Image (tube, rainbow, N blue to C red):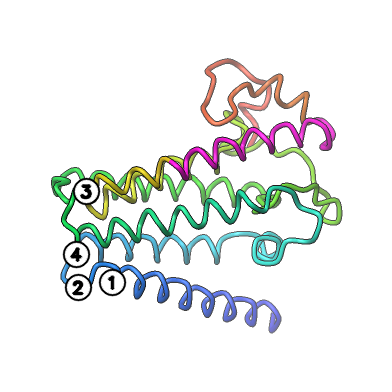
Amino acid sequence: MQGYNLFRLHTVGRWIITTGCLGVGLFLAAGTTRIAMLWAYIAVFAALLLLTMLGVDPGLAQERTHPQAGGQDARARFGAGFLFLVTVGFAAMDVGRLHQSDTVPVLVSIIALTIFAAALGFQIWAMMVNPFFSPVIRIQAERGHHVITRGAYRWLRHPGYLAMIVAIPASALAIGSWLALIPAAGFCAVIVRRAGREDEFLKRNLPDYIDYTKHVRGGLFPVLRYNPWQGQQ
């Protein structure tokens, strides 16, 4: 119990540092704290990040913060993180300083923020049912890596990646910038490529994954057809 409590305290500490750095960075980019949608975006991001960090399996939390050596496509991980920061940073700068494309209607920003929250919620669901949701492509043999067929994985093979390619463009519009959709599109391209590479890697290296792909045809997007795992929990 003491070890678990220390883990929770460490998790909350990382959450405070992460959200604090993001918030300070975005307000510095904007040059002002008087942007309501920016506050709303940071609040939603912070709440869902805390839910993610506290809700996932401790083994997965360790894997996500300190993945073991041997994983593939680390450049995609770096590129996606960089393009996320560019997207939200440029959006904040646009609405606070540049005013080049900050004409997103408030209603559109609110809808985009709702979509962002729903996408992150979907990603949290995927992470909670999949204890092997690693930031790098590798077989986690030391953790008994196997095919996951429950939750969102009943309908598509990469629900987490789908959530990402919805959430980041929604971030640009939630903060209020049209031009920030450009780096967001770059983020989506990196994720689509990453999903393809991971799919091929798992076909070659994870037992039963090829059989899984025959029943769950959707990779990033669901394909409506019967599969024998649809009724499993």
Of labels 2 and 1, earlier in sequence is 1
**Residue of label 1:** 27
Looking at the image, is mark 4 or mark 2 nearer the viewer?
4
Rendered view: 75 above or below 213: below
SS of the residue under disc 2: loop
Residue labelled with disc 3: 109
Residue 57 rendering spot, x and y as whole percentages: 66, 60
Task: Identify the disc placed on residue 32.
Answer: 2
Foreground residue among 149 and 42: 42
Mark 2 and mark 1 in contact? Answer it, CB < 8 Å.
Answer: yes
> What's the amino acid at mark 2?
Thr
Q: Is residue 93 left or right of residue 66?
A: left
Q: Residue at x 22, y 72 (%)?
A: 31
Q: Amino acid at mark 3?
A: Ser
What separation in Å lies between label 3 and label 1 (alpha carbons)? 18 Å
Badge 3: residue crowd in 10 Å (few <14, some 14–19, many ≥20): many
Q: Earlier in the sequence, mark 3 or mark 4?
A: 4
**The N terminus lies in which quarter of the figure?**
bottom right
Q: Secondary structure at mark 1?
A: helix
The magenta segment: 186-208
What amino acid type is highlighted by mark number 4?
Arg
The answer for how far apart the CA atoms under marks 4 and 2 are is: 9 Å
The mark that comes first in sequence, 3 or 1, is 1
Q: CA distance from mark 2 to mark 1?
A: 6 Å
* Mark number, residue 97: 4
Closer to viewer: mark 3 or mark 4: 4
Q: Residue at x 55, y 52 (%)?
A: 79
